[in-house]
Amino acid sequence: MKITQVQSHILQYDLPEELGYSQQYYAKRTAHLVEVSTDEGITGWGECFGPGPIAIANKGIVEGVIAPMIIGLDPMDRDVIWHKVYNLMRDHGQKGMPMQSLSGVDIALWDIAGKIMGQPIYNLLGGAHRTSVPAYGYGMMLKRESLADHLARFKDEAARILDHGFVATKMKTGLGPEADVQLCAAVAKGVEGKGRFMVDANHCYTTSDAFYVGRALDEMGAYWFEEPVAPEDLDGYRELRAGLKTNISGGEAEFGRWGWRGILENRGLDIAQPEVCALGGITEYQRVLALCHAHFTPVINHVWGSAVAVAANLHLLAAMPPMPGGLHPWEPMLEFDTTHNSFRDDLLTEPLDILGQVQQNAGHVMIPQKPGLGVEPDTDMIAEYKVA
Ligand code: CA
């Protein structure tokens, strides 16, 4: 079998309302799907992390740089292809957009491999340690509204997400340390007696501001404090982890085994959050997972994007070994963005219906069982929303 074509599909629509996090407001939903075709009619799907103009630029890397390197190769040679592409792009970027682009292609090759072998991806990875995974719902985005409006909305939204059935919920911060502590207190109030909450700063703090917010979180019993400082600030991560009770999490903006080696050796994370659609695909995720577990750092994948990304993560979460194991072992969770996302909810010919599953199954989501990713995007929907 040979690879005959590698295509990027950039899908986009206007969100019903503008949403924000600590770095920016945004009003469009984007997804970057990768379709790899073969000479025997089998097609694989992958996804690249990166919204808006980043996706447009990544399409240029996928179709202009990576495709010519791999057309004519055997799609089963996933690791060979990974290293050929990485080695040829190395001088031009060992992190960031080249790796995001390679990720989408690699995931599509795993989808093809599963379809060739008639097996779901989790079986290619060694089998399922679990048949379902608990999901946490994130929401509580920033808006252009007053602090008082934020406080009321965050409290209600946190309660609503847990009432829906999610096992935990996650909020954004980014209005400034003092206002952020008030936001966290509102969410702590909203989840009282219902479940856990986590806090995602999207690396907006200095180390001292992160300590200010983190000490308040220690009192409120937050489960984790995500990306408190910039991903490059390994010393900040280590100091925060040593100085706070709340778990420090991060890693969605790190790439490849060499980037992850630095974070882990520096002992800055209680919980690692690798992003399979950015760090180098499923092939490299498996190496990053092994590195995390070699450092006894538990993993809860970062999940963002369309139903293709969600499906890929469900396979990875199924195949993730317990660490360290036990009668009632520590379990990973599926990250689920509760804000409007048609590319996750309506993209597939047979939708995953995560919201329905969470509601009906005590917060748990089943692992897809069909070969490869086990999901098929609706090509009519792709044609309707494709902007590049
Ligand atoms: Ca995050």
Image (cartoon, rainbow, N blue to C red):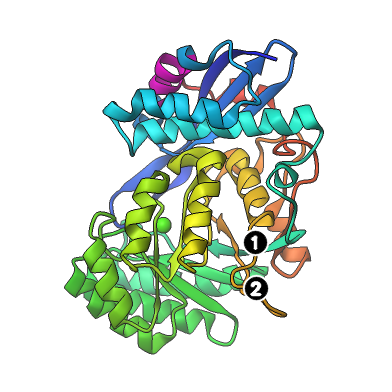
Examine the rendered structure and indicate whether residue 89 appears above or below residue 255.
Answer: above
Look at the image and tell me whether residue 302 can be seen: no
Q: Secondary structure at mark 2?
A: loop
Which residue shows up at 59% across the image and 23% down it? Answer: 35
Tell me if the residue at label 1 has its CB under 8 Å from ligand 1. Answer: no
Q: How far apart in space, not on screen, are marks 2 and 1 (Cα)?
A: 8 Å
Q: In this picture, which residue range is highlighted in magenta?
A: 57-67
Percent coordinates x, y for residue 131 in the rendering: 77, 59
Relative to residue 100, is residue 73 drawn left or right? right
Give residue 321's mark.
1
Q: Quadrant of residue 295?
A: bottom left
Q: Amino acid at mark 2?
A: Gly
Residue at which label 2 appears: 325
Disc 2 and disc 1 in contact, CB within 8 angstroms: yes
Relative to residue 139, is residue 308 drawn left or right? right
Q: Amino acid at mark 1?
A: Pro
Ligand 1: give its quadrant.
bottom left
The quarter of the rendered structure image containing the N terminus is top right
Q: Secondary structure at mark 1?
A: loop
Examine the rendered structure and indicate whether residue 314 appears above or below residue 59.
Answer: below
Q: Is residue 58 magenta?
A: yes
